[in-house]
Image: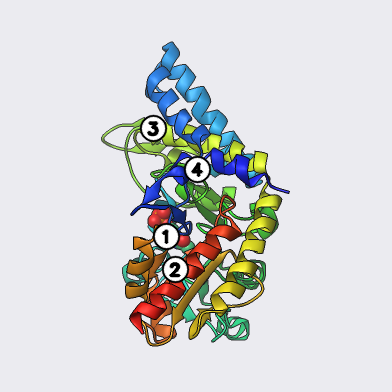
Amino acid sequence: MLDIKKIRADFPILNREVNGHPLVYFDNAATSQKPQQVIDKIVEYYTMYNANIHRGVHALSQEATDLYEASREKCRAFFNIPTAKQCLFTFGNTHSINAVASGAHVFVKKGDEVIVSAVEHHSNIVPWQMLCERVGAYLKVLPVMDNGQLDMNAYHEMLNPKTAFVVVNHISNALGVTNPVKEIIAGAHKYGAKVLIDGAQSCGHMKVDVQDLNADFYTMAGHKMCGPTGIGLLYGKEEALNELPPYQGGGEMIDQVSFEKTTYAGLPHKFEAGTPNIAGGIALGAAVDYLNEVGMENIAAYENELLIYGTEQIKTIPGAVIYGDVAAKAAVISFNVEGLHPYDIGTIVDKLGIAVRTGHHCAQPVMERFQIVGTIRASFAFYNTQEEIDVMVQALQRAVKMLS
Ligand SMILES: *Cc1c(COP(=O)(O)O)cnc(C)c1O
């Protein structure tokens, strides 16, 4: 189905050795690797048409602007965003969330409730806490069950006319569990609440159709979908984006400026103050081209095979406990070995060239919920292989032997 050998050849970093061993990169939930096509695009920008965009009449500025806007169009189509002006470039997923939360006082009033799930990344908790403090609203937590799935019965009971905003990730970075976001969105809308979906873990691993989901806002991280760091996307419904005040003031985001009164530019520029990450925006377009060529359905199917194989293999390790071991999930396996500290295991397998994440994964409340200090997290991408999983499991077995 996928020509993995050919795909791997596109990712130069996969050829490197770490601590004298071939690199096995299983930290894709933290950031994905970049194909040569994306790396080349960054170099090409700085080599050929580095200029500021939307400003100059000169040729380089026009070229850079055209490429940047062409990339926006690619991103728009990739996520089925209705219009390019609803496809905002940001500096990353965290920035996208903050852009919404910082202006969300237009949606959330004193005494209202904001629901966040118990499996959120810190970047989808803290901005909402800040909002609640600012306006005098209440933060409510949608609980997670022992199997890692959100407690949807509790959710439906929590919803009430005071619910003003619901924020939840599409896929949890700490557990890999896919959340029933369509049901969450539909439930919130019954009460007139707005919904933001954090798509940092879904954007490079499954086909996302923002119109089908019907969320009011959806955020994406460029660096988790084979693009560079420092670039992200924010989708919003047009009416919601028009209502939302701009996050930052500056150049590019204005219509008219005087000391008496400034009027803002229309979408998307209202939210794109200052010089953006131009190279990153253009290179994200190359990442989207690359993902389209491999095919998101193919990627999702292949990564699911890796998930099933990896789950089986990890279960052969005595004392292994997987958190969020359910059917509907991404290729993220979060686990521990009873009696051993995840950090100790992570350190040993790193010596063998294997990059897994250990710790709380920026989701301390999840760790608290499961009463653990952290987990070992192996997260796969479409350029990984079953052979690499075998190498990891052998290394894990070795680590367990050394430590127990
Ligand atoms: C990575 C991640 C974030 C944070 O994104 P940044 O790239 O650090 O801005 C937020 N939420 C989830 C679910 C993530 O996986």
Q: Please say whether residue 174 is visible from this viewpoint.
A: yes
Write down the residue under mark 3: 252
Q: Of the residues tagged 2 and 1, which is closer to the observer?
A: 2
Residue 42, given in percent of the width and then of the height, sits at 43, 30
Earlier-in-chain disc, 4 versus 3: 4
Earlier-in-chain disc, 2 versus 1: 1
Quarter of the displayed picture in which ligand 1 can be seen: bottom left
Disc ID at residue 354: 1
Judge left or right: residue 113 versus residue 403.
right
Earlier-in-chain disc, 1 versus 3: 3
Disc ID at residue 395: 2
Query: Gap between marks 2 and 1, in whole Å?
Result: 8 Å
Earlier-in-chain disc, 4 versus 2: 4
Q: Of the residues tagged 1 and 3, which is closer to the observer?
A: 1
Q: Quadrant of residue 374?
A: bottom left
Where disc 1 sits, the SS reads strand
Write down the residue under mark 4: 88
Residue at left 59%, top 64%?
330
Residue 213, given in percent of the width and then of the height, sits at 66, 59
Q: Please say whether residue 171 is visible from this viewpoint.
A: no
Comparing 360 with 351, the one in front is 351
Label 4 Cα crowd, 10 Å radius (few <14 / some 14-19 / many 20+)? many
Name the residue type under label 1.
Ile
Name the residue type under label 2.
Ala
Query: Gap between marks 4 and 3, in whole Å?
Result: 13 Å
Comparing 108 with 187, the one in front is 187
